[in-house]
């Protein structure tokens, strides 16, 4: 190994100054880039108030929404009448169906003497209208004062009412309701609330899982994934959460509702028909398709509309962009005016977002798949036209010149000198846009352009059918995954590359 002396080092440094005397940027570029990134991140944190947003975000609500995607609620409600009579009810469209009697709800019945106002009797808050006629003010037309008094006579009867109701959400959580008192047990703590028909008064300090914004008003109970509830002066509403999707195959109106898999299979294979007009298998399939809660047939039909909408819109865009790209390519059509007009058309079509086109065509054609197909067609014509024209401008002219040198006609020159170079790329880009538009069609469907996007938006807008939202999102994901695999395989085959 040869050692260099100082004069030789100086000589080498003089010949290569960039190596031994680096510029300021070369020496500090990593520190400058890092500092710029940190400053930009701090600016974004301040400008978008990220810290404030994170600090004030209601993560409990976010967790509840996520839980709603994979669960459902049963909602027993205990109403307390002014005379102390209680009544346990469920919503009209309860997952348990009519006449629900779950084993986690215990009720104690008893009889009670209740005084019921007669029909036509006025309450103390109503004002008796004045009657002025030939008989004088306050007279009762067509009857005596005794008859009028008889209309207001109340009736007394024995009635069966709920004396006590206990709702058990899990091993550590339960709500017990008796007239004028509610006892809640959760996580080893007990909350006793007095209700008198006008105010809600907790005894002692509220635990962390109970909140009351205004004294005397309702108390909200949060039990985590087990559910939640509300205590009002005359109404106690409980939400018990169950993992899974209720009545996914058969709704509460189906004869197969509530039966196990083996029982359903036995009924399907049985010769004894439930409905004389059709077999049990046909009846079961019909009940699944027309499930009133999940609406499978309608969801699948809307999903098919989305697929067709994306395919037709992309196909028409590809067919129109293909010839226009030849007019826009400067090396194919040597006419400045034609090039500029076509390219500006592409710029106009793709500069307006697909969502804006969807809103425009929804107003023009009304809600439906036609508006969605038109929006995809317009946007993709501009984008594909630009990509196709740029691909044409970057072809190898040697192949085209070779075909032209043998005296081929202009059409033959394009057919054999240009298309073999760009067709695999054209097809690959069209396939990619078809797969991408399957997702985009869902978004534009939410603004009225038809397809499953509109149904998805309707389910989200109710703010209560999040399990239906999860169902449709999973269907969309499955379709996107399948189309992505098909598109990748076809593109790889067209480009001559092995698919992975």
Image (cartoon, helix red, strand yellow):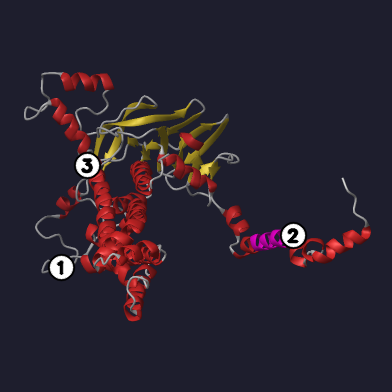
Name the residue located 50 percent from the left edge and 49 percent from the top edge: 216
Q: Which residue lies furthest to the bottom in this view?
A: 337
- Farthest residue to the left: give it: 277
Decide: is 41 above or below 255.
below
Q: How far apart are marks 2 and 3 (CA)?
A: 60 Å
User: Residue shown at 50%/43% (left/top)?
Assistant: 63
Q: Nearer the viewer, residue 7 or 50?
A: 7
Q: Residues within 10 Å of mark 3 (few under 14, many from 20)?
A: some
| Disc with the residue nearer the chain's start (1 vs 3) | 1
Q: What secondary structure is marked by label 3?
A: helix
Q: Which residue is pictured at 88% across the width and 59% down the height?
A: 9
| Residue picked out by circle 1 | 136
- Mark 1–mark 2 Cα distance, whole angstroms, equals 100 Å
Q: Is residue 56 magenta?
A: no
Residues in magenta, as a range: 32-42
Residue on which the image places disc 2 = 31
**Residue 125 seen by the camera:** no
Please name the residue that numbered disc 3 is placed on: 297
Could you tell me how far apart the alpha carbons at marks 1 and 3 are, in whole angstroms? Answer: 67 Å
Dot 1 lies on which element? loop
Helix, strand or loop under label 2: helix
Question: What's the residue at 41%, 37% (across, down)?
Answer: 70
Residue 364 screen position, x and y as percent: 23, 69
Contact, mark 1 vs mark 2 (Cβ under 8 Å): no
Q: Is the magenta stretch mostly helix, strand or loop?
A: helix
Quadrant in which the N terminus appears: top right
Residue 357 image position (x, y, % from top left): 32, 66
């Amino acid at each position: 190994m040869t050692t260099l002396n100082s004069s030789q080092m100086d000589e080498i440094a003089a010949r290569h100054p960039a190596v031994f005397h680096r510029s300021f940027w070369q020496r500090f570029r990593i520190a400058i880039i890092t500092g710029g990134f940190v400053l930009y991140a701090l600016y974004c944190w301040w400008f978008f108030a990220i810290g404030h947003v994170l600090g004030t975000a209601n993560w409990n609500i976010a967790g509840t929404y996520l839980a709603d995607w994979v669960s459902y609620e049963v909602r027993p409600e205990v109403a307390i009448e002014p005379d102390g009579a209680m009544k346990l009810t469920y919503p009209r469209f309860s997952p348990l169906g009519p006449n629900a009697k779950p084993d986690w709800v215990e009720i104690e019945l008893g009889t009670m003497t209740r005084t019921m106002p007669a029909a036509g009797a006025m309450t103390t808050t109503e004002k008796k209208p004045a009657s002025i006629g030939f008989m004088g003010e306050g007279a009762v037309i067509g009857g005596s004062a005794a008859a009028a008094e008889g209309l207001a006579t109340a009736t007394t009867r024995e009635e069966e009412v709920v004396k006590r109701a206990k709702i058990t959400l899990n091993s550590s959580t339960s709500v017990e309701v008796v007239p004028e008192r509610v006892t809640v047990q959760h996580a080893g703590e007990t909350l006793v609330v007095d209700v008198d028909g006008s105010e809600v008064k907790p005894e002692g300090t509220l635990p962390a899982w109970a909140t009351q914004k205004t004294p005397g008003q309702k108390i909200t109970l949060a039990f985590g994934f087990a559910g939640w509830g509300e205590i009002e002066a005359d109404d106690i509403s409980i939400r018990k959460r169950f993992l899974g999707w209720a009545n996914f195959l058969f709704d509460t109106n189906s004869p197969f509702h509530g039966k196990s898999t083996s029982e359903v299979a036995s009924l399907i294979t049985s010769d004894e028909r439930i409905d004389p007009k059709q077999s049990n298998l046909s009846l079961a399939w019909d009940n699944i398709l027309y499930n009133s809660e999940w609406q499978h047939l309608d969801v699948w039909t809307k999903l098919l509309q989305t697929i067709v909408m994306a395919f037709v819109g992309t196909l028409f865009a590809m067919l129109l962009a293909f010839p226009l790209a030849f007019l826009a390519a400067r090396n194919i059509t040597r006419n400045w005016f034609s090039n500029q007009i076509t390219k500006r058309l592409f710029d106009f079509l793709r500069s307006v977002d697909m969502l804006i086109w969807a809103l425009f065509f929804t107003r023009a054609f009304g809600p439906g798949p036609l508006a969605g197909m038109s929006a995809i067609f317009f946007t993709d014509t501009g984008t594909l036209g630009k990509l196709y024209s740029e691909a044409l401008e970057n072809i190898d002219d040697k192949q085209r010149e070779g075909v032209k040198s043998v005296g081929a006609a202009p059409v033959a020159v394009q057919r054999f000198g240009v298309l073999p170079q760009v067709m695999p790329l054209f097809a690959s880009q069209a396939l990619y846009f078809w797969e991408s538009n399957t997702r985009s069609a869902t978004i534009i469907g939410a603004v009225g352009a038809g397809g499953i996007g509109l149904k998805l938006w309707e389910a989200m807008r109710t703010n209560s059918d999040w399990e239906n939202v999860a169902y449709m999102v999973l269907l969309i994901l499955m379709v996107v995954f399948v189309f992505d695999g098909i598109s990748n395989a076809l593109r790889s085959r067209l480009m001559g590359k092995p698919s992975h």
